[in-house]
Image (cartoon, rainbow, N blue to C red):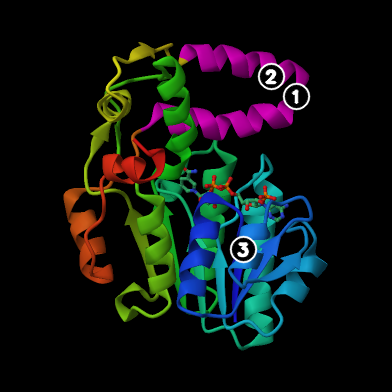
Amino acid sequence: MYLVTGATGGIGRRVVRLLREKEMQVRAFVRLTSRYSELEHRGAKIFIGDLRQEKDIQKACQNVQYIISTHGSDGDALSLDYRANIELIDQAKSTGVVEHFVLISVLGADRGYEDAPVFQAKRAVEQYLTASGLNYTILRPSGLASNLLPLAERFRETGFYLLIGDPKNRTSIVSTDDLARMVVDSVTVKAAHNQILPVGGPEILLREDIPRIFSRIFNKEPTVINPPLFVIDGLRSALLLFNPQGQKANGTFRTLLANEFFCTKEEIANLEGIFNFKLETLENFLRKYLAV
Ligand SMILES: NC(=O)c1ccc[n+]([C@@H]2O[C@H](COP(=O)([O-])OP(=O)(O)OC[C@H]3O[C@@H](n4cnc5c(N)ncnc54)[C@H](OP(=O)(O)O)[C@@H]3O)[C@@H](O)[C@H]2O)c1
């Protein structure tokens, strides 16, 4: 039995699909309010709970051999990126039957960004998992291509693209389909065992390439709105006055905008060697989903 957290998310739903195509038993951890009917139709066992509740995690981990943690932080990195993952790891150890643990971390988790709670939580969990004695794979993706689908739809309607910060910053956005395949294969591919792997797409893009790709796909001239990063800094100062928690979450957002997140050619070649398939480009991924 596989336990998948974040099973309704961009990565998680694709992981459940792939596992069910292979006729694996899947327990999908979802919230009562999650949109999970697709997972049910695919034959996953639905476990309703909240990852903020230790008891729910304990119950969900009973009789599972594989744990795949893909959930997001929902604005609360301490409870979800940190505590929920620590509890999943503790439960995996205490049941004694978990054969492999796959964790979705983030590219740059090891860079020590002190202002970014998600990065700090991911790094702490990575360290806890690698020291746990469990068999693991940690995947550190850069941006996910599926996150760009709503932006592409907005571009299709309006021709506008909002690009905050330096347009020349480099990024290696990964196809969420490829990432899900790597997640699933991590359990069986020996070369992925007990590894921390940076994950990106096959090309190093500049952030300004994204509206160009949208423009090619929709055959529409882009209007790029490019406010500088200090706009976000102004917003953060205002948030601090009213909502210190929101200001902290915003620190992760600023970190993502202010820095480069890309994989080297060698890292991508290593990834393709381990998983034995060619990664698809961002444009290829988008064209599959945008029906153009
Ligand atoms: N987005 C990126 O570009 C990116 C880049 C690098 C790494 N990552 C990592 O990739 C993972 C997925 O990220 P994402 O942004 O793509 O996620 P997402 O699609 O927003 O999905 C988040 C998932 O977590 C679930 N969730 C949130 N709070 C929960 C709770 N209290 N109890 C149970 N489930 C809960 C959500 O359930 P509901 O359906 O109920 O909301 C959803 O299934 C995260 O670990 C993230 O840090 C993302």
Q: Which mark is residue 243?
A: 1
Residue 263 percent across, percent down from the top left: 27, 47
Q: Do labels 2 and 1 touch, CB within 8 Å?
A: yes
Above or below 179: residue 203: above
Crowdedness of circle 3 by 10 Å Cα count: few (<14), some, many (20+)? many
The quarter of the picture where the N terminus appears is bottom right
Q: Earlier in the sequence, mark 3 or mark 1?
A: 3
Q: Quadrant of residue 47?
A: bottom right
The answer to if 234 sits in the magenta stretch is yes
- 284 and 28: which is toward the camera: 284
Residue sitting at the far bottom: 97
Q: Quadrant of the C terminus?
A: top left
Q: What amino acid is labelled 3 in the image?
A: Leu
* Rendered location of residue 117, percent (x, y): 59, 41
What is the C-alpha distance between the residues marked 2 and 1? 5 Å
Closer to the camera: disc 3 or disc 2? 3
Circle 2: residue type: Leu
Question: Residue placed at 69% from the left, 58% from the top?
Answer: 83
Q: Is residue 209 above or below residue 79?
A: above
Q: Which residues are magenta?
A: 230-259
The answer to whether mark 3 and mark 1 are in CB contact below 8 A is: no
Query: Which residue position is annotated with label 2?
Result: 239
- Label whose residue precedes the other's in the sequence (3 or 2): 3
Which residue matches tag 3?
A: 39
Q: Residue 104: percent from the left, percent from the top?
A: 49, 58
Note whether 53 is above or below 121 in the view shown: below
